[in-house]
Image (cartoon, rainbow, N blue to C red):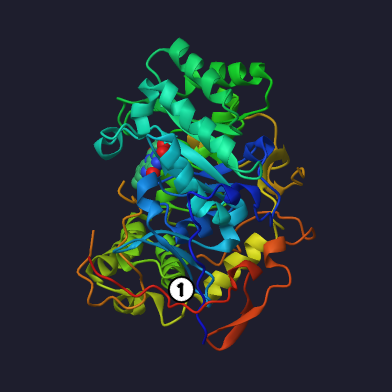
Amino acid sequence: MSRRSHSPPDPSSSRLAKRPRLDFEPLTPDDYKDGLMLAPMVRSGALPTRLYSLKHGASLVWGPETVDKAILHTERVVDPVTGVVSYVGKTKPIFLTHPIEKPYLIYQIGSADPETAVQAAKMVMQDVAGFDLNCGCPKPFSTHAGMGAALLSNPDLLCSILTALRQAMPPEISVSAKIRLLPEQNDTLKLVERIINTGVNALTVHCRTRNQRKREPALIDRLREIVEFVEGMGRGVAVIENGDCEGFWDARRIREITGAHSCMIATAAEANPTCFSPTPLTDLEKTFIPAYIRLARYVNNHWSLTKYCSSMFIGDHVNGSRSDLKNVRAAIQQAKCYEDMEQITGTGTGEDEFRGIVEAIQKRGGRRVKVQILNGDSGPMSSKGFSDSATTEATTTATDVPTTSAGPEDAPSTAQSECSSKLTPEADGTRDRLQTPPTGPADPSLMNAPLAPANEMRMPLPAMITGELPTPTPTPRIG
Ligand SMILES: Cc1cc2nc3c(=O)[nH]c(=O)nc-3n(C[C@H](O)[C@H](O)[C@H](O)COP(=O)(O)O)c2cc1C
């Protein structure tokens, strides 16, 4: 089997921005509207989680914050069998992605320097739809270097990074920012105005201040004024609410309170990546966790990262019980590698799960899911204290898109066989009532795709992953 490599682009080359490869409809501000987004999450926002979130209705997915410098010295390696793209650093992959998620993938940058941010963006721009600047992380590893929430008190620097990204990226690449509320509403509005004027397509507001902790309720009541302010600026920029959204139905409640164009979900998606669906999976130990682990193995997600994510999953129980979940959790806890999980996962390769995800995403034809509430039956909103006298039916539909931390994903190396690793820390989908259009243009990146051998079966791979030069899949490195 031939292995192929793609040389990493020279980040200093200004020619990169002049020849973008446009293989899907570029993101516009409208693509950030009427959506449910997967939030950026270090560790928890790993590739398998993003893929399952997309399968179950996420409109767009944010990758975990990656510090600009961490990606600069990576090598881009493509696995010709799975199509997985790894940005491999000296000791470990810093970022994993797959072409199937590209039209929906927002890569989040941690930065305190415009030039370095641009260099980092140029490294990965061929694999993403947009970039987001993290202006909200209050963790010391981020703020001590002037990144994350530290940017909130340095608006000149914050806006200079966004401006630099917007100028250096071709128009097809979207730029956005994610902030927290400032203690004073007026200061927040002033900051928001400056950010909008940099030319971003979307602004996510985590409705907590820098000093608020996770357990404190998000201050969503403050958002409506911000949304109205942004709308008053007349640029059509999308405002995405973030904070305490629990899923599809809860997003409706939050959007009604805040007027936000979309909601973004972190903690609830970390617990159940199918929460984007109006009918999220239940009994995850049976319906989701085994499939998730098989998929993670297939896409070469490092076991330690898969272990971490799997141990966070928890869903409602309908046919099973909490003790079923406990047993699976215990198995995950004890396992040192994927092979140790075969009692739970069976010996499936994960290829079936991968094909199911590819099919679900391909049905969108490169378009982004729009969440629309139509008249019809009611959902389980009462559990959130939300009531609506009108009968409603929630559907997710895709609509046409106008043409137009030291590497926080801190999984060391690759996944395949790591019994020697010392590192530790479904979904049948048929229950979903996601409605994607039966017809529509296929994602051009997958049209006329060559067939690559994958185990016994042959499956289409996106054309963009076939290159000329042989290269190995990243070798597992420990440490
Ligand atoms: C495990 C975890 C990792 C996170 N990593 C990031 C990150 O990389 N970048 C970021 O902007 N926010 C990050 N956050 C914050 C979330 O994106 C989100 O703003 C916050 O959790 C509030 O949303 P929630 O109430 O839905 O959890 C992280 C949150 C969690 C729980």
Residue 260 placement: quadrant: top right
Taking depth in this image into account, of 125 and 405 the one nearest to the observer is 125
Taking depth in this image into account, of 123 and 30 the one nearest to the observer is 123
> Looking at numbered disc 1 in the image, what kind of residue is underneath it?
Tyr
Q: Is residue 236 above or below residue 64?
A: above
Name the residue rendered at 53%, 24% in the picture.
Answer: 195
SS at mark 1 in the image: helix
Confirm or reject: label 1 Cβ below 8 Å from ligand 1.
Answer: no
x and y, in percent, of residue 265 in the image: 48, 41
Instruction: Please rate how many residues cluster around mark 1, counting C-alpha atoms within 10 Å: few if below 14, some from 14 to 19, many from 20.
Output: many
Name the residue rendered at 55%, 18% in the picture.
Answer: 193
Name the residue rendered at 40%, 12% in the picture.
Answer: 184
x and y, in percent, of residue 31 in the image: 66, 41
Residue 409 placement: quadrant: bottom left
Side (left or right) of 106 relative to 29: left
Q: Label 1 belongs to which residue?
A: 298
**Which residue is situated farthest in the top direction here?**
186
Identify the image quadrant of the C terminus: bottom left
x and y, in percent, of residue 421 in the image: 23, 72
Q: Is residue 331 above or below residue 46?
A: below
- Ligand 1 is found in the corner quadrant, namely top left
